[in-house]
Image (cartoon, helix red, strand yellow):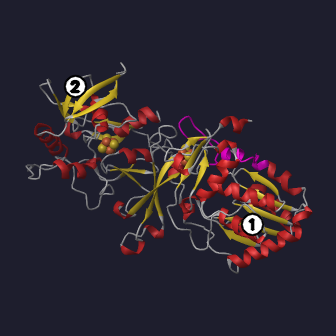
Amino acid sequence: MSTDLIQLNIDGKHVEVPKGTTVIQAAHKAGSEVPFYCYHPGLSIAGNCRICLVEIEGVPKLQIACNTPATDGMVVYTQNAKVRKARQDVLEFLLVNHPLDCPVCDQAGECWLQDYYMQHGQYQARMDENKVKKTKKATHIGKEVMLDQERCILCSRCVRFCDEITGTGELGIFNRGDHSEINVYPGKLLESGYSGNVVDICPVGALTDKDFRFQTRVWYLASTDSVCPGCSRGCNIQVHTKKDVDRHAFKAQGRRVIRLKPRTNPLVNRWWICDEGRYGYRFVDEGRLSALKQGTWAENLQQLAERIKEVKNKGSIVGLLSPGQTNENLFAMKKLFEGASAKTLCVSHTAAGEGDNLLKTPDKNPNRAGAEALGLTVIATNQLQGALCNRDIELLWVCGQDIARILGEELFSELRKRMRWMVYQGSNQNVTSAAADQVLPSTVYVENQGSFTNVDGRVQRLWQALRPLGEARPDWHTAADLAARLELKGFEWQSEEMIFENLAEKVPFFSGMSYEALGTGGLLGKTAALSS
Ligand code: SF4
Ligand code: SF4
């Protein structure tokens, strides 16, 4: 046995763990459920909620599993009568002053107090005193977060998050005994740009999300794994969407995406996401292009194919791609533009934005590295004018970029006058789409499968969370359909997965990859290929 490993026995199961592992981690590895509130793998250990008590052979008193190092030969019991009685007592204590808000609390359905109470509770209440009333319910403590002190069980996770992760220290625990309460320090507000994470880690409904409050019940939500498109970090997220929209009272103003939550990936975002990414999902349902300007898809593509054939060899077709498109859509559209003898450009979404030392990167393009790996040069927004304006363009095909915003409306309208035909293929309405001759509505990232490559060259998968809205289609689908009308070969894909297989064969950066191999955590591309 390696000297870096130790062996212990948990509930009769043998388990081997690295030295330095705590009993709670070893128990979870052994498949023994040890409940916890204050413990969080991404934060320091506070050891104050006491619900993770376990019995260790040879130790007279029960011990908290979160702060006890596992040692070689240790024998631990996590489910015996003594331990279960202790949990019941801890729960009884935590509930002494906790209000029974469950019917209106947004945490209902994912509240750890409810869950553990159902497993271990003291069902015959013995409390006949009045509960200690805290200050008024639901106070604003920041742009995104509400606080209800009465529901707080003082686990201090939120305080440690602000001290240890953002370093902004807005929250503290004030007063003593049963008058202790969580609050922001005088004159401070939760405004670190990562405030939504305190809602995720609050095990009860004390910290709630203003954006989500009273929109729906969590049991009406479906969850799909995805990747945030807000910047080149590519934080791993879960997309929570409405199921059975018409069957219940909570309609969330008709939105299909209700909230985004972080998904743990130790190699990218650990347990966190920024507020910008978390609340940046409204474009999925608002201002969408969900219909063709006129005619059917078949008519539109036939008309476009004829135009392309007419001007194909005159060197006057320009195709404009975006590093916001997935690897699959970029691969397909680039191949189509090559087949149509178009000059292909790829332009940054926006000028660089704000980054920080935690997760946010200044590059707001989720797939710049993917575009570069596919051989595209991503030009900055201020280079677009030079790239477009000195050309004689018969047909400009814009994918996802609002070039009117990038160029400025005056310059755009001059350019537009010189152009014979303009196609806008994208997901949301903007000035460019309004000025286009043809609009081909595209799906957004949660409506199709695909992958993005992040700033570190990690290729990560997106899963389909929603059906395409209206007539919207994935870009690769449009490319394949048009290619058939232009009699181009090599577009015989039936799914994003087939494109990815094709891409992994052709592009060295992706070699050896498959959707299955990417799994939920992603894989690093062959960076040597990227930099060469
Ligand atoms: S507000 Fe929530 S996370 Fe913060 S101490 Fe209270 S229970 Fe814990
Ligand atoms: S850091 Fe970037 S990728 Fe991560 S959540 Fe924020 S915007 Fe999204």
Residue type at numbered disc 2 = Met
Choose top left, top right, bottom left or bottom right for residue 483.
Answer: bottom right
Q: Give the residue drawn at x 73%, y 76%.
A: 300
Residue for badge 2: 74
Where is residue 481 shown, x and y percent of the image?
70, 69
Which image quarter is the N terminus in?
A: top left
| Quadrant housing the C terminus | top right
Tell me: residue 207, above or below residue 484: above
* Dominant secondary structure, magenta: loop
Q: Position of residue 57 (x, y in %)?
A: 15, 27
Q: Position of residue 222 (x, y in %)?
A: 41, 61
Label 1 sits on residue? 483
Could you tell whether 491 is left or right of 237 in the image?
Answer: right
Q: Residue furthest top?
A: 3
Magenta-colored stretch includes residue 375: yes
Indicate the secondary structure of the residue bearing disc 1.
Answer: helix
| As drawn, 136 above or below 22 | below
Q: Is residue 360 left or right of residue 106?
A: right
Q: Residue at x 69, y 60 (%)?
A: 400
Q: Mark 1, residues whose alpha carbon is within 10 Å: few (<14), some, or many (≥20)? A: many
Q: Amino acid at mark 1?
A: Ala
- Taking the magenta stretch, the answer to whether it contains residue 260 is no
With respect to residue 101, does 433 lie above or below? Answer: below
Residue drawn at (25%, 40%) of the image:
32
Which residues lie in the magenta part?
A: 354-382
